[in-house]
Amino acid sequence: MTAQLPGHPHIAYVDNALCVEGLPLADLARTHGTPLFVYSQQSMLDALAAYQRGFAGRKAQICYAMKANSSLGVLQVFAKAGCGFDIVSGGELERVLAAGGDAAKVIFSGVGKSRAEMKRALQVGIGCFNVESEAEIDVLNEVALGLGVRAPISIRVNPNVDAQTHPYISTGLKGNKFGIAHERTLQTYQRAAQLPGLKVVGIDCHIGSQITSEGPYLDAMDRVLDLVQAIEAAGVPIHHIDFGGGLGINYNGDTPPAADTLWAKLLAKLDARGYGERQFMIEPGRSLVGNAGVCVTEVLYLKPGEQKNFCIVDAAMNDLPRPAMYEAFHQIVPLSPRAGKGEVMDVVGPICESGDWLGRDRDLNVHSGDLLAVLSAGAYCMSMSSNYNTRGRAAEVLVSGGKAHVIRQRDTVADQLRNEQLV
Ligand SMILES: *Cc1c(COP(=O)(O)O)cnc(C)c1O
């Protein structure tokens, strides 16, 4: 008997055993150990296909925002599917190249690009810099002139709209560090257009992450199109419009619009305002990978208490940082559900911090030695993981076409000590 997990395509119970694309997670855990990240390639491609349907017949480039999950095997999936990449560091650029991505389809975002990062990006011929401040414009101009080239740029504008998401992942409000204020955009474009080391190619905005309604996108789009109109009226042509990423996923009954439905609405607005034939770019991250991944973890100990019961597992905040960072919710389910009533407990890791929890007040029927899956673990988990408490980062497996491929070996202690030396 098969029972699909709603909102988690290609993850299902088959005869009471949780599977990814039909492969039992318990078998993968036995072979590769825990904690273990397992990703469904088909789920990633399905998520991408929703955007591709949304843009059918339009000029659009999808640039996967790779900070969501920058493992080479994941990048390879998106590179092969024709995606570009949204990067935020020189290190991410090297990952794109190592995974076989096309530098010409790379856009470089971020408020703190160094000269060395700019130089390398210009040398490999990236598609566009999304410039985030007036100071950065001058530095990029200098670096490009030093190389005898012109740097293609968009200016990231801060449309001052509320994405109605967690404050740490909201980026489009006046108080945020991102982008150039709406009021200063026109004059900044006029100045950039006169600098000999720059070539203005586009405009960009990205208002936040885990956005679950279409309103903020529609508002931001209006604000950006008003600017395009003003900038072009001032004689600076805008070749592409980049609407960023940020579409949410279902973690806990969240109901974000589907990518194709959202883009049908957004494109209707673009058409109505006469911009439907433009070149578009988007930078989705979480919505392409978030629900394609799970983290399998073993129950080490049950620790009943007067006020709280604890379920201590072998995954921790170094593997799954989102609960500690944003008090985020991940569903946690047993790989083989037991019959009978459960108990309410907090699922916590072994790290010496009270912030090291994965789920609070969960109703679970588990014994020590049981395996659990932390769901929605494809985005902002492994890419944010650390070696805190000298814990090796987990292994990663990509399931594709009925086969499990190890795309990252578990860190050994030797891996962790490699760059250190005694005085
Ligand atoms: C993080 C980020 C994205 C992707 O955000 P998601 O919420 O993962 O879709 C896109 N663009 C920029 C500039 C970002 O910083």
Image (spheres, rainbow, N blue to C red):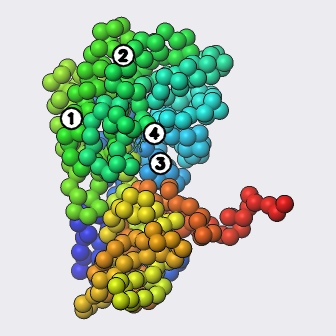
Give the residue number, with chain letter if any, for mark 3.
67
The image quarter in which residue 347 lies: bottom left
Q: Distance from label 2 to label 3 (Cα)?
A: 30 Å
Q: Earlier in the sequence, mark 4 or mark 2?
A: 4
- In the image, the residue with mark 4 has its CB under 8 Å from the nearest atom of ligand 1: yes
Q: CA distance from mark 1 to mark 3?
A: 25 Å
Q: Amino acid at mark 1?
A: Leu
Q: Residues within 10 Å of mark 1 (few under 14, many from 20)?
A: some
Mark 2 residue type:
Leu
- In primary-sequence order, the first of circles 1 and 2 is 2
The residue located at (59%, 30%) in the rendering is 118
Instruction: Kindly identify which residue carries mark 1.
Output: 218
Q: Secondary structure at mark 2?
A: helix
Classify mark 3: helix, strand or loop.
helix
Which numbered circle lies on residue 186?
2
4 and 1 marks in contact (CB < 8 Å): no
Q: Residue furthest front?
A: 307
Question: Which of the 4 quarters of the picture holds residue 54?
Answer: top left
Instruction: Identify the residue at image location x=40%, y=70%.
Output: 358
Residue furthest out toward the right: 423
